[in-house]
Image (cartoon, grey):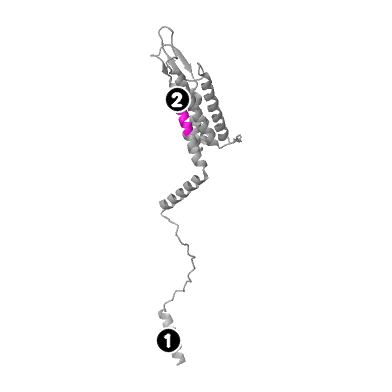
Amino acid sequence: MIPRRLRKEISLLPSHKKFIGLGSLILFVSVFLPWYQEKDDYFGNETFLGISGPMYLAGLTVLAISATILLLTFFEIQRKKLPRLPFHEWVFHLLAGSLSLYLLILTNTVYLHPKFGVNLVTKSIGFGVIVAVTGAVLLIIGALQERKSSDPVLYALHSDSLHDEKDDADGKLEPLIHLPRKARPVEPLKKEPTIEDKEKEYENLRIEL
């Protein structure tokens, strides 16, 4: 079971990191699944995993690639210092996904070749290949999303669009011209004379006369 703290750290990862981590995990698991199956009544059944059979080296390469990306992702979740790459991180992930996909295609061309296998009718590609292709595609998608998020121009445009959408949603638009606001003088309220004030005023006039 995944600890609560680790689940929280994974949930805080950006979407492209989740795609990359999930794709590398699927690739890692796929090499331990059947990549080739053949059934024959005389020679028996034959099953090759990703790390076994004549194409074991391709499976080991996919295993090394996925294990490296998983390790780097785990270091990032644990907030540990990552080794500095001579190129952008998304380039490494894109190359890793593309290379894994190329090795899968190369493996299938060997297994499906007419000169490979005993019974050409009963041989088939194992479901591990489908799992591996899914992991490689997720890895490539995550790398492309990571490229967009790492581009400062696209990031700035995206941030501006988010601010505009937020202002529109709040119903507040920025004025084109900002005019300085002057404080208006507050005039005192005029007090209407009461009956007592009028009587005093009348009394003062009578005394003066």
Q: Which x, y percent locates residue 57?
A: 53, 20
Q: Secondary structure at mark 1?
A: helix
The amino acid beneath tag 1 is Tyr
Is 154 contained in the magenta span? no
Q: Which x, y percent locates residue 44?
A: 43, 9
Range covered by the magenta-colored residues: 130-140
Q: Which x, y percent locates residue 113?
A: 43, 17
Name the foreground residue: 119 vs 184: 119
Q: Residues within 10 Å of mark 1 (few under 14, many from 20)?
A: few
Is 139 contained in the magenta span? yes
Q: Is residue 36 above or below residue 8?
A: above
Q: Are marks 2 and 1 in contact (CB under 8 Å)?
A: no
* Foreground label between 2 and 1: 2
- Residue marked by disc 1: 202
Q: Is residue 24 visible?
A: no
Q: Is residue 58 visible?
A: yes
Q: Is residue 52 above or below residue 148?
A: above
- Residue marked by disc 2: 131
